[in-house]
Amino acid sequence: MSDAQTSAGSKRRGRFRRIFKTIAYPLVALLLIGWEVQEAHVYQSEDCDLKTSAPSESGLMKPMYSGVLRLTGLHGSPQVVSLGIDENLQFIQTNVCPARSFTADLVKAVASQGPALIAIDKYYTQGVCSKDDSDTDTTALLSAIEDVGVPVVVGASTTESRDKINTSSCLAAVPQLFTRRADGPSIPPNVHTGLTRLNENPLKIPLTWDIFSSDSAGANLTTANSFALTVAELIKPELQADAKFQQLLKSPQQPYANTSDLPQNTKVSDLLCAVASSDVRTRWNLTCAPDAQKLDLKGKIVVLGAESSADKYSVLGKDVYGYQLQAGYIAALLNGAYLRDIPPAWLLLPLLLFYLGAEILLPYMEIHKHPVWPLWHVKYAIVWEIGLFGATMLVGFFVPLLFHRFPPVAMLLVVTAVFVPDALFESWYVMNERLEEEEAEKELRS
């Protein structure tokens, strides 16, 4: 085949590819921009879907996101442990008032082991056991918390605002047992609260929520800390002065945690059997082994919760309870074991570099026999493009991990979807061109 024929074939091929890329790459850019807008969007619906997951985090994408988190090898703080109220303790889980007395005994048992902080993944409503919360069960709980001598974090809840005002939130704070009021009980000074609300995607750490101070007209819009963030800032106060961490709190995109590495979890009955008095074990009808082992809780952050089927999640291929996730979020925040999202502008950079190399530089090096120094002539640009594509994928995936950023998996997949069909077409064309050249050489020799 003559140089003129080769040049004509290259030009035709180049025109086809330019048309394909002219459509594909702007489409990719628009998809990425739309993706980021969706991810950062704070929903204004009446369903109160505030900071929710992007479509990429379900279906096909979720296993890939899970794989990335496992690959990072990020580990949470070993200082965090979790204790679950056994699922078979139905009496405790279904009777609100006796459950407060049970929690009081449990808090005392945990406190006897010298923890650094106790976090109770449960919220307590006002006026349930008595109108003024002066009943014996509530009094026992408040007294036990006040006597432990360490910070105690309890959950807080929200409700849907009746006004359903179209702002950045439709959630309103719910008055809690631990909300100070004139006609209420004395609140222990060591009590702190945090919202137990989780992100729709349990791989993400809930940090803050925009909520109204009350479900009434004229309520103020405030920012409330999550349960996990409240604990983390109490144990590690320097987070409040950390510029990067504060920037993370201001971002609408919540970070990813490696929830495949959750803290040690033990049943509450095991602890009570090991350290509680016989009166406590009898009161709650606990069946204990004679050789029950004590847990090492000294200096630990102990997260208490319930093994409830209503609070169970499927995460990274296994079922976990809500309090275990909260413990994992706390451990991740304390150890910096989380991945932040990449700023939207940086998502387009790998795409731009790949486009410049594959669609401008390499075709120029293929067409010109003597490109401008230091460039060299390449016979088959597609071979180099495949190499460039592989390098782009590796850089786009691993470089963000070095900076504790979540790789732009969605972007890399979309670029792959554009490149692969183009590479297959080009490879097929080059193979046919090579066969035609061989046939032409045979004819000339014959």
Image: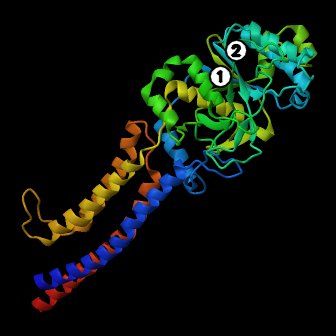
Image point 89% across, 20% down: which residue? 132
Look at the numbered disc 2 and give the secondary structure of its residue: loop
Q: Is residue 131 left or right of residue 262?
A: right
Residue 291 in view (yes/no): no
Look at the numbered disc 1 and give the secondary structure of its residue: strand
- In which quadrant of the rendered view does residue 390 lie? bottom left
- Tell which tag, 2 or 1, sits nearer the viewer: 1
Percent across and percent down for residue 176 are 78, 26
In what quadrant of the picture does the C terminus appear? bottom left
Q: Is residue 31 left or right of residue 132?
A: left
Residue sitting at the far front: 218
**Which of 423/257 is in front?**
257
In what quadrant of the picture does the N terminus appear? bottom left
The residue that mark 1 highlights is 81
Report how far apart the C-alphas of labels 2 and 1 lie in the structure.
10 Å
Image point 77% across, 45% down: which residue? 162
Percent across and percent down for residue 445 are 10, 89
Residue 399 drawn above or below residue 286:
below
**Which of 69/345 is in front?**
345
Residue 310 in view (yes/no): yes
Of the two numbered discs 2 and 1 on the same chain, state the one appearing first in sequence: 1
Q: Is residue 434 left or right of residue 280?
A: left
Q: Is residue 277 left or right of residue 145?
A: right
Name the amino acid type tagged 1. Answer: Val
- What label does residue 102 carry, if any? none
For the residues bearing labels 2 and 1, Cβ distance under 8 angstroms: yes
- What label does residue 295 carry, if any? 2
